[in-house]
Image: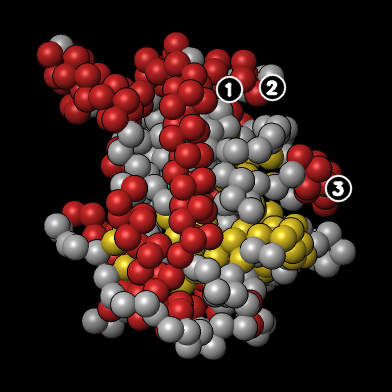
């Protein structure tokens, strides 16, 4: 194939493609792998039942079913769903969010493709603009979405060692510079891959810097409040004309409907709708119909608070306890797990790279994600980039348990320690 520049850029090997292929093989092909990679949400019985019942209700209503699968929505998405979202967000956030401030996308992954390319890349005056990630490491899925090369800049974190086995990243505001070529900032909160939750103070400071420099602050709220609310510390929501919030129904339990939600000022929402029309005519309408009632009634907030959050928090605590037991004797740190569904493990001065560890674990039937993929925009050599892995604790307890045991066993080999038979 003789490919265009676009073709070459978007078909080369990418971390996110590798991760999604691993995920598909492990979850959908009956493989025996212990799946601790990927960002697939858990199957929570209560949530699966809610959506199953709702689906049955829709299928039994011939008219509703026909409308759901047989009509295109407008380019900004299902209008009734957007209206319900605007009421829910206004009430929950305490900000005035109108329907004109919301557009849907086919998953929030698509939202990042749109937003990053709207704000960064090649400009008609010959200048090149970039997206700044104030806190590296950041989400692997951002890495390859830029339409041109050299699209991102990232700011190295401050590392706080909390105890013998726990650490936390903080934004290093001393080195955070909004140079002329920066046209947007983006943070995931809770952060994928680390489970970090940027403090209210950090978010306030970022909002202030965004306003002073007149650049949008994009907050990726895929795991945040008010749904799915996978946050285990106090975190206040933020929204203003300078902020763009990206949300999703995926981690609440509907990844397959591909329903992303963007909240932003009206000019940006108009631009997103225009992109939707060109790229996909309209965002998918199935997620909005299935989730409509949960949004309209506000029930999604109670379910997130009373079911989703405790479910993941308990799984996180179990996984941490298991690591403490199985990694005994290994020089490891866990990033303070404050949200999302991941543990970010740091093996300081590990004798092999995280890429090699990933391969060794894969050969032993365990999938994790090597940490070096999570540094879009941070091109400098930094040993830390090769010393971390991300594991997900969203899958069944048995899988997480066996996976962590196998990782502990392999690490002991890596560190040349005796492995009991
Ligand atoms: C931080 C973050 N943002 C965005 C996404 C994209 O999710 P989706 O496209 O399913 O909404 C993910 C998926 O794992 C994620 O972890």
Q: Nearer the viewer, residue 165 or 73?
A: 165
**Quarter of the image with the N terminus in it:** bottom left
Where residue 218 sits in the image (x, y, percent)?
64, 47
Whole-number angstrom distance, CA of label 3 to CA of label 1: 26 Å
Q: Nearer the viewer, residue 275 or 112?
A: 112
Residue 210 visible, this orientation:
no
Q: Residues within 10 Å of mark 1 (few under 14, many from 20)?
A: some
> Where is residue 75 drawn, in percent x and y?
40, 34
| Category of crowding for the residue at label 3, using alpha-carbon neighbours closer than 10 angstroms: few (below 14), some (14–19), many (at least 20) | few
Toward which corner of the image does residue 244 lie, by quadrant? top right
The label on residue 89 is 1
Q: Earlier in the sequence, mark 1 or mark 2?
A: 1
Label 2: how many Cα within 10 Å (few below 14, some 14–19, many 20+) = some
The structure residue drawn at horizontal position 52% and vertical position 69%, both measured from the top left corner, is 328
Question: What SS does tag 1 mark?
Answer: helix
Residue 249 at x, y = what percent?
41, 35
- The residue that disc 2 covers is 95
Of labels 3 and 1, the one closer to you = 1
């Amino acid at each position: 194939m003789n490919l265009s520049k676009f073709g070459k850029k978007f078909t080369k090997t990418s971390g996110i493609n590798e991760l999604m292929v691993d995920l598909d093989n492990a979850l959908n092909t009956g493989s025996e792998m212990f799946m601790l990679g990927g960002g697939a949400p858990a199957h929570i019985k209560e949530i699966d039942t809610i959506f199953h019942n709702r689906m049955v209700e829709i299928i039994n209503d011939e008219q509703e079913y026909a409308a759901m699968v047989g009509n295109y929505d407008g380019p900004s998405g299902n209008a009734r769903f957007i209206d319900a979202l605007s009421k829910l967000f206004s009430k929950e956030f305490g900000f005035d969010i109108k329907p004109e401030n919301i557009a849907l996308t086919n998953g929030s992954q698509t939202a990042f493709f749109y937003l990053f390319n709207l704000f960064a890349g090649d400009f008609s005056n010959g200048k090149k603009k970039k997206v700044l990630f104030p806190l590296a490491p950041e989400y692997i899925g951002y890495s390859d979405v830029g339409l041109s090369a050299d699209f991102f800049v990232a700011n190295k974190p401050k590392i706080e060692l909390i105890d013998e086995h726990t650490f936390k990243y903080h934004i290093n505001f001393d080195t955070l510079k909004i140079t002329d070529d920066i046209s947007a900032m983006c943070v995931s909160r809770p952060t994928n891959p680390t489970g970090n939750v940027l403090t209210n103070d950090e978010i306030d400071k970022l909002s202030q810097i965004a306003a002073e420099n007149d650049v949008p602050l994009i907050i990726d709220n895929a795991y945040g409040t008010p749904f799915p609310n996978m946050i285990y510390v106090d975190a206040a929501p933020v929204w203003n004309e300078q902020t763009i919030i990206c949300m999703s129904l995926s981690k609440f339990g509907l990844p397959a409907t591909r329903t992303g939600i963007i909240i932003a000022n009206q000019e940006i929402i108009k631009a997103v709708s225009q992109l939707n029309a060109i790229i996909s005519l309209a965002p998918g309408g199935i997620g909005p119909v299935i989730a409509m009632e949960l949004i309209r009634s506000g029930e999604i907030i109670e379910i997130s608070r009373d079911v989703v959050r405790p479910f993941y928090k308990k799984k996180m605590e179990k996984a941490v306890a298991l690591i403490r037991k199985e990694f005994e004797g290994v020089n490891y740190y866990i990033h303070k797990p404050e949200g999302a569904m991941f543990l970010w493990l740091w093996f300081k001065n590990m004798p092999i790279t995280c890429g090699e560890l990933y391969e060794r674990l894969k050969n032993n039937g365990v999938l994790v994600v090597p940490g070096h993929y999570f540094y879009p925009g941070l091109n400098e050599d930094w040993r830390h980039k090769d010393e971390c892995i991300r594991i997900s604790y969203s899958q069944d307890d048995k899988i997480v348990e066996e996976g962590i045991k196998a990782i502990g066993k392999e690490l002991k080999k890596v560190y040349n320690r005796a492995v009991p038979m």
